[in-house]
Image (cartoon, rainbow, N blue to C red):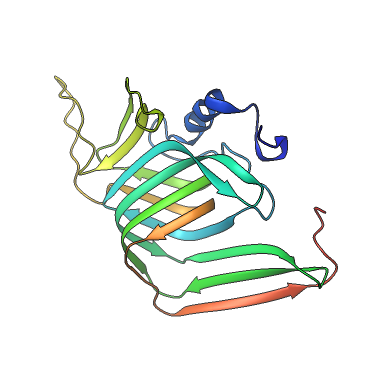
């Protein structure tokens, strides 16, 4: 059973469906809604001025945070560029009764060949997709029953009037904040990387 503190409403498959509907851009992609609540200190946050990727794939899955198993949305993307990257993590410091915030920043464009992300919430002031496809389909594997793709991997059905191309960038998000529990890049450049650690005494306000 998931902790109620980590969920907006409900648990199980029905929650995943509600979360996905909230995350998907339904029309022109002007904004994302944060569809899942992230527990304080249970993951980390990525903020960026802009994120671009040539190919984009989104589907439901599960992950692990500080409290245990949690429903997540998986995003896989290729040809990634990130402007204004700030990655932060806040947690308690054992034995000192305070909290530490660790921040990774890059002062130039970050580039990654491929990325695999497990996220619990996302907000963007504006999001656009090239060759976007949102698809629900029959499968024994829950992770492929609902997918969103964009870019060259979109693979849309043929229509009589609709011509969906997949030229990159497949996805662009501006003024982004993402709550993550997992991030992996097969190759990534971090120009001007700076790591800061700030300690605050007195423990976490959340308890």
Q: Residue at x 63, y 41 (%)?
A: 37
- Say which quarter of the image contains residue 92: bottom right
Q: Is residue 72 left or right of residue 190?
A: right
Q: Is residue 7 left or right of residue 173?
A: right
Between 199 and 63, the one lying in front of the other is 63
Q: Is residue 177 visible?
A: no
Q: Is residue 152 left or right of residue 78?
A: left
- Say which quarter of the image contains residue 127: top left
Q: Is residue 150 visible?
A: yes
Q: Residue at x 72, y 39 (%)?
A: 5
Is residue 180 placed above or below 85 in the rendered structure? above
Between 27 and 18, the one lying in front of the other is 18
Quadrant (top left, top right, bottom left, bottom right) of the N terminus: top right
Q: Is residue 160 left or right of residue 67?
A: left
Quadrant (top left, top right, bottom left, bottom right) of the C terminus: bottom right
Q: Residue at x 65, y 28 (%)?
A: 9
Where residue 190 sits: x, y (%)? Answer: 40, 73
Q: How many marks?
A: 0
Where residue 59 sits: x, y (%)? Answer: 40, 36
Between 139 and 18, the one lying in front of the other is 139
Is residue 111 placed above or below 158 in the rendered structure? below
User: Which residue extends farthest right?
Assistant: 202
Where residue 57 sits: x, y (%)? Answer: 33, 42
Q: Residue at x 22, y 41 (%)?
A: 153
């Amino acid at each position: 059973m998931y902790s109620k503190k980590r969920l907006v409403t409900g648990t199980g498959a029905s929650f995943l469906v509600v979360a996905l509907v909230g995350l998907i851009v339904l029309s022109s992609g002007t904004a994302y809604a944060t569809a899942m609540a992230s527990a304080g200190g249970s993951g980390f946050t990525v903020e960026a001025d802009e994120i671009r990727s040539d190919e984009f794939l989104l589907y439901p899955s599960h992950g692990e945070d500080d409290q245990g198993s949690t429903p997540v949305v998986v995003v896989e993307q290729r040809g990634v560029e990130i402007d204004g990257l700030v990655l932060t993590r806040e947690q308690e410091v054992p034995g000192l009764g305070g909290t530490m915030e660790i921040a990774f920043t890059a002062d130039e464009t970050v580039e990654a060949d491929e990325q695999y992300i497990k996220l619990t919430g996302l907000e963007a002031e504006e999001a656009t997709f090239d060759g976007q496809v949102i698809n629900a389909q029959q499968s024994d594997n829950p992770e492929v029953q609902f997918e969103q793709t964009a870019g060259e991997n979109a693979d849309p059905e043929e229509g009589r009037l609709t011509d969906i191309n997949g030229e990159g960038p497949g996805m662009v998000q501006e003024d982004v904040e993402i709550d993550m529990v997992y991030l992996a890049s097969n190759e990534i450049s971090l120009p001007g990387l700076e790591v800061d650690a700030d300690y605050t005494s007195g423990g976490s306000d959340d308890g």
